[in-house]
Image (tube, helix red, strand yellow):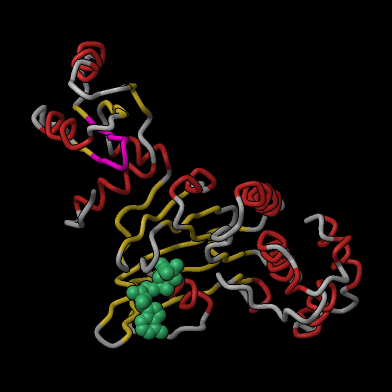
Amino acid sequence: MILLEARDLTCRFGPKEAVKGLDLSLSEGDLVGLIGPDGAGKTTTFRMLIGLQKPSGGAVVRHLDRQGVSYVPQTFSLAPELTVAENLQFQAGLFGLPDPAPRIRRLLESVDLASFRDRPSGALSGGMKQKLSLCTALLTEPRLLLLDEPTTGVDPVSRREFWELLHAVHDEGVAILFSTPYMDEAEYAHRMLLMHEGRVLQEGDRASFRRGLPGLMFRLVSARRREVQAALAALAPLDLFAEGEVLRVRFPDQDPAPLLARLSALPGVEQVRLAETSVEDVFLHALVEAGGAHG
Ligand SMILES: Nc1ncnc2c1ncn2[C@@H]1O[C@H](COP(=O)(O)OP(=O)(O)OP(=O)(O)O)[C@@H](O)[C@H]1O
């Protein structure tokens, strides 16, 4: 069942087009990632989906009532001087929820915040603030949860823990749309939209992304990157991406052994191995196709 749809959604701020012709459909059971760097248009998209920002063009259709969808903005938006429990009671009051105390207790227990219920929210760590925001969003028992960069600025351990919580929420039947600038978080999504400069460059699941980039992907390490990069380019690869001392290079399908030997023999190459196509590879490829710059 479809919960929310966006059709040809556009948002302009003066001459700036923050979102350009976005189509999106969210259904029950979905776990969708909106993946893109700072300024891609993720926050603007969420704000239009939730009704906080009027689109310049296109339409959003919500098949849910106000309580059926919850939004957690990127920046902590709860009152820092109120305690954890007070913030939840306040939010429950805003929604007129009857007898919220048992639900608040259960939610705090589920995210391991029960012992912090009397702590001022402003004194929580980044990861704890995110968990409290999540509890607030879950108070109304929504069917769809929208989370804008929930793990940005959260340390890696808390990040992992937060993802476990989100998966538990999803397992209970809540559909989720989250955004992230971290390509590695794409692995948490069942479906992804790669966004850049207001446009969705590609949409699909990991398997379809891999199918879109067939061939052999190799990962090389070299301190002499520029030299190796030039030698690789002369071999006419399908893609060649470089970051720091790591190069990723894709060739048409063929027997990998001779190619591996050839790459290992290039002067300056310290390590070579066959690699899986990553979401980042797909993103970089889509950027090149779209005419964007890459390293
Ligand atoms: N109110 C506004 N007025 C003018 N420009 C805006 C406004 N809001 C966003 N923008 C611009 O629109 C573009 C998309 O911004 P948006 O915040 O949606 O991106 P994002 O992907 O969420 O990145 P970030 O994580 O940096 O917020 C950016 O270039 C931003 O500067």
Position of residue 214 relative to residue 60, above or below, is: above
Position of residue 147 relative to residue 91, above or below, is: above
Nearer to the camera, 116 or 67: 116
| Residue at position x 49%, y 77% in the image | 47
| Residue at position x 60%, y 48% in the image | 156
Nearer to the camera, 64 or 132: 132
In magenta, the rendered stretch is 241-250
Position of residue 149 relative to residue 250, above or below, is: below
Quick check: can you spot residue 161? yes
Nearer to the camera, 240 or 42: 240
Give the quarter of the figure containing the N terminus: bottom right
Residue lying farthest bottom? Answer: 14
Residue 28: x %, y % from top left: 59, 57
Q: In this view, does 137 lie to the left or right of 282?
A: right
| Residue at position x 18%, y 20% in the image | 266
Q: State whether the magenta stretch is mostly helix, strand or loop.
A: strand
Nearer to the camera, 280 or 49: 280
**Which quadrant holds residue 76?**
bottom right
Q: Does the magenta stretch include residue 247?
A: yes
Q: Does the magenta stretch include residue 72?
A: no
Residue 217: x %, y % from top left: 29, 29
Q: In this view, does 217 lie to the left or right of 74?
A: left
Position of residue 295 relative to residue 100, above or below, is: above
Ligand 1, image quadrant it occupies = bottom left
Quick check: can you spot residue 171? no
Residue 211: x %, y % from top left: 32, 35
